Image: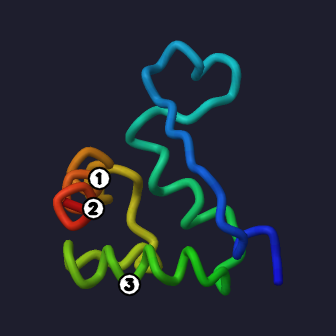
């Protein structure tokens, strides 16, 4: 089992003020883990499947950050599903 498989809280930052200190901007939060973490991570496989099924988007297609669904749209779908 890797650290990626543990149940962890996730905190998302992206207002821009923290960018100068190395944090991602909002439109970079979703693409970053999908392009910088191990491709075989079960969590990322779940995210890829979700993006494919809900947004008809494949992060492995090598498209730029501007092609990803917005984080607000993704989190809105997740929020509605949790309700």
Foreground label between 2 and 3? 2
Q: Which mark is residue 75?
A: 1
In the rendered view of the protein, which quadrant contains the N terminus?
bottom right
Give the residue drawn at x 38%, y 84%. 49
Task: Name the quarter where the C terminus is drawn.
Answer: bottom left
Q: Position of residue 18 (x, y in %)?
A: 59, 19
Determine whether, in the image, residue 39 is placed left or right of residue 50.
Answer: right
Judged left or right of residue 10, residue 3 is right
Looking at the rendered image, the disc whose residue lies closer to the viewer, 1 or 3, is: 1
C-alpha separation, residue under disc 2 versus residue under disc 3: 13 Å
- Write down the residue under mark 2: 78
Mark 2 touching mark 1, by CB under 8 A?
A: yes
Which element carries disc 3, helix, strand or loop? helix
**Residue at 64 percent of width and 17 percent of height:** 20
Residue at 59% in and 65% down: 35
33 or 63, which is in the foreground?
A: 33
Cα–Cα span, label 2 and label 1: 5 Å
The reply, left or right, for residue 53 in relation to residue 44 is left
- Secondary structure at badge 2 equals helix
User: Toward the viewer: 18 or 68?
Assistant: 18
Secondary structure beneath dot 1 equals helix
Residue 50 sits above or below residue 81 on the image: below
Q: Cβ–Cβ below 8 Å for labels 1 and 3?
A: no
Q: In the rendering, at what x and y percent does residue 43 appear? A: 57, 76
Q: Return the residue at label 3.
A: 49
């Amino acid at each position: 089992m890797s650290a990626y498989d543990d149940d962890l809280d996730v905190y998302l930052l992206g207002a821009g003020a923290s960018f100068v200190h190395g944090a991602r901007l909002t439109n970079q939060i979703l693409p970053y883990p999908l392009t910088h973490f191990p491709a075989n991570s079960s969590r990322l496989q779940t995210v890829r499947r979700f993006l494919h099924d809900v947004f008809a988007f494949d992060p492995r297609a090598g498209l730029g950050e501007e092609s990803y669904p917005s984080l607000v749209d993704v989190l809105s779908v997740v929020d509605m599903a949790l309700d």
